[in-house]
Image: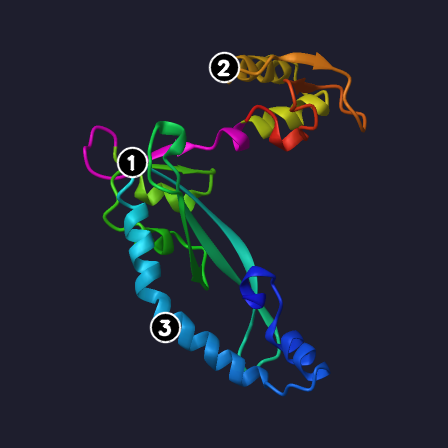
Amino acid sequence: MAKYADGLPLYRQEAIYARDGVVIERSQMAQWMGKVGFELEPLAAYALARIKQGERIFADETTLPTLVPGAGKAKTAYLWAYVRDDRPFGGRDPPIVVYRFEDSRAGACVARHLEGYRGILQVDGYTAYHRLARPEGANEGVQLAACWSHVRRRFYELHVSDASVVARQTLEQMAADTGEAGRVFQGEAGHPFRFHSGQRSDLKPDTLLV
C-alpha cells in the first residue's frame, strides 16, 4: 500500500521498519511485490476488458522513472491509463481506471492494450493514438475524440502573449459553447483573461472552459 498509494520506495520502507527494530530487506519486499502483481494480473485484465465494453474511453500516458536492475540508474518508462466513466451519460456502472506499465511510449502499446475496441477514444494530440483511428468511410476501428482542454490551452497561450486577437474571440466562443458565463475580468498574476462562473473563480489558465 505504501509503495503504490503513497509513492514510498521499498528502500525507504526498509529504513522505516529498521527504526522500529523490524528487519525486512527490500529484496524480500520486492519479491512480495512481484508475487502480488502476478496474482492480481487476472483482475487487472478483467478490469481492462470491462473498460473496453464501454462506448467511450479516456486514455493518457505519463512518464515513470524506473530503476534499471543492476545498473543503479533510472530510465524513463511509461504508465498508460485507461478510464471508463459513463455516469455523465446516464450510466450506472462504477467508474474504472486501469494502468499499464510499459518501457515504451510507442503506438504498439496502446494498440495492444485496446485490441478489439471499437468505441470512442478521447485522447490528446499524441500521434501514437492515430494508428487506432477508424479510416474515413469505414465501420471498423476506433473513433477518436480530441481533448477539449488541450485545444483551448493553445488559444489561451496565444491570448496571454497578445499574439492573436482571434484567440480571444475563440476562447469566448468556447466558453459560450460549454455553458460558462463567459464574463471577462482582470485576472491575477498579470493574466487579464479568465472566465468566472459561480464557485469556479479559482480556475487556472490550463483548467478553463471545462
Residue at 36% over, 72% down: 38
| SS class, disc 3 | helix
Q: Residues within 10 Å of mark 1 (few under 14, many from 20)?
A: some
The tag earlier along the polypeptide, 1 or 3, is 3
Residue type at numbered disc 1: Glu
Q: Earlier in the sequence, mark 1 or mark 2?
A: 1
The residue to which callout 3 is attached is 38
Q: How many marks?
A: 3
148 vs 44, left or right, is right
How crowded pointer 2 is (Cα within 10 Å; few <14, some 14-19, many 20+) is rated as few
Tell me the quadrant of the picture where the C terminus can be found.
top right
Q: Is residue 95 above or below residue 62?
A: above
Q: Is residue 97 magenta?
A: no
Q: Are the residues at dot 3 and dot 2 in contact (C-beta closer than 8 Å)? A: no
Which label belongs to residue 147?
none
Image point 29% across, 56% down: which residue?
Answer: 46
Image location (x, y in percent) of residue 30: 51, 79
Report the Cα–Cα distance between label 1 and label 3: 29 Å
Quadrant of image for the N terminus: bottom right
User: Residue 202's image quarter?
Assistant: top right
Numbered range of the magenta stretch: 136-151
> Amino acid type of disc 2?
Asp
Q: Which residue is mark 1?
A: 55
Q: Position of residue 147 (x, y in %)?
A: 47, 33
Residue tagged 2:
177
